[in-house]
Image (cartoon, rainbow, N blue to C red):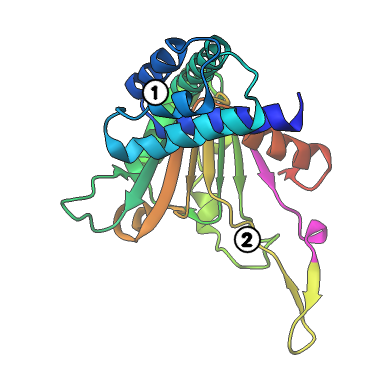
């Protein structure tokens, strides 16, 4: 692919992302109807009546790229490329979706998924594997019940939680007690060892080190929950917390693969 042709493909991609399906098809139809020897001016004139007017700039940018960088391509070829790009974009839109999740006051004009509901949805979606990562954990009775239900249907649960010992008291023993008696027995639990944490000198010469502050859940490498919220009643019900749910696509598996690599490297260890 030459750089000149690539410029046209980039412009086609931008048009597909900007226009809805009906407008993309309308644009492809107009281009396809042009004669093979249509002049650059005729190509621009063909889109003059695309409605609404606010969308014409994306169509015009694509036509300009065609005229400037790949003028020898016949209209039929450009129309096929436009339709193909739209089909690929539609496929990927169907494969994955993103949804914001929120804890806190909710104005009437903004309706976001509740954090606790989204997290419980991830646990309920798991059929084989569930990864759960958090800094602080306590309370969250509904989550405990959901995890027990996941275990009952044979889900392999992997927990990565901040440790009172490895964090030198940054979290208290309540995080460990939260796992008892049933959840911990059937789950793989990992910690970030103190000796594997990077240290820097503090103002008084004392060592400063990182804490396990990530919060996420992944079900079967297909559904990903990311949030600022810890697994606590306050975080799931009272605080202001913001996160995102990802259904499908490569990101859920990428997160699981990242933690797998940390385990293989010995940066996370079984406890």
What span is in magenta?
A: 188-198
Q: Residue at x 75, y 90 (%)?
A: 204
Q: Which mark is residue 164?
A: 2
Q: Position of residue 158 (x, y in %)?
A: 61, 34
23 left or right of 259? left
Q: Position of residue 151 (x, y in %)?
A: 50, 25
Residue 206 in the image: above or below residue 271: below
Describe the element under mark 2 as helix, strand or loop. loop
Q: Position of residue 68 (x, y in %)?
A: 62, 33
Residue 13 visible to the viewer: no
Q: Nearer the viewer, residue 42 or 221?
A: 42
Q: Nearer the viewer, mark 1 or mark 2?
A: 1
Residue 77 in the image: above or below residue 39: above
Query: Hey, which quadrant is residue 105 in on the image?
Result: bottom left
11 left or right of 254? left
Residue 239 visible to the viewer: yes
Q: CA distance from mark 1 to mark 2?
A: 68 Å
Q: Nearer the viewer, residue 161 or 92?
A: 92
Q: Nearer the viewer, residue 9 or 234?
A: 9
Q: Position of residue 213 (x, y in %)?
A: 59, 57
Q: What residue is pinned by disc 1? A: 46
Describe the element under mark 1 as helix, strand or loop. helix
Query: Hey, which quadrant is residue 70 in on the image?
Result: top right
Residue 189 in the magenta stretch? The answer is yes
Quadrant occupied by the N terminus:
top right
């Amino acid at each position: 692919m030459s750089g000149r042709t690539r410029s046209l493909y980039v412009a086609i991609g931008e048009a597909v992302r900007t226009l809805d399906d009906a407008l993309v098809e309308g644009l492809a139809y107009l281009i396809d109807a042009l004669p093979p020897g249509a002049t650059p001016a005729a190509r621009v004139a063909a889109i003059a009546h695309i409605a609404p007017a606010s969308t014409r700039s994306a169509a015009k940018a694509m036509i300009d790229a065609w005229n400037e960088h790949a003028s020898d391509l016949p209209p039929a070829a450009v129309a096929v490329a436009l339709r193909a790009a739209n089909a690929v974009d539609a496929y990927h839109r169907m494969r994955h979706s993103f949804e914001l999740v929120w804890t806190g006051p909710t104005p009437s004009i903004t309706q976001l998924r509740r954090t606790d509901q989204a997290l419980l949805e991830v646990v309920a979606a798991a059929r084989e594997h569930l990864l759960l990562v958090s800094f602080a954990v306590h309370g969250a009775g509904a989550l405990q019940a959901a995890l027990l239900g996941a275990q009952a249907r044979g889900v392999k649960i992997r927990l990565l939680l901040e440790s009172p010992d490895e964090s030198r008291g940054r979290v208290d023993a309540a995080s460990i007690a939260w796992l008892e008696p049933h959840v911990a027995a059937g789950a793989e639990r990992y910690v970030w060892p103190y000796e594997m944490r990077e240290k820097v000198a503090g103002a008084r010469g004392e060592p400063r080190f990182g804490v396990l502050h990530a919060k996420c859940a992944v079900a079967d490498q297909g559904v990903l929950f990311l949030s600022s919220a810890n697994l606590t009643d306050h975080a799931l019900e009272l605080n202001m917390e913001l996160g995102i749910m990802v259904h499908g696509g490569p990101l859920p598996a990428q997160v699981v693969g990242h933690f797998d690599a940390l385990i293989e490297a010995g940066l996370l260890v079984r406890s």
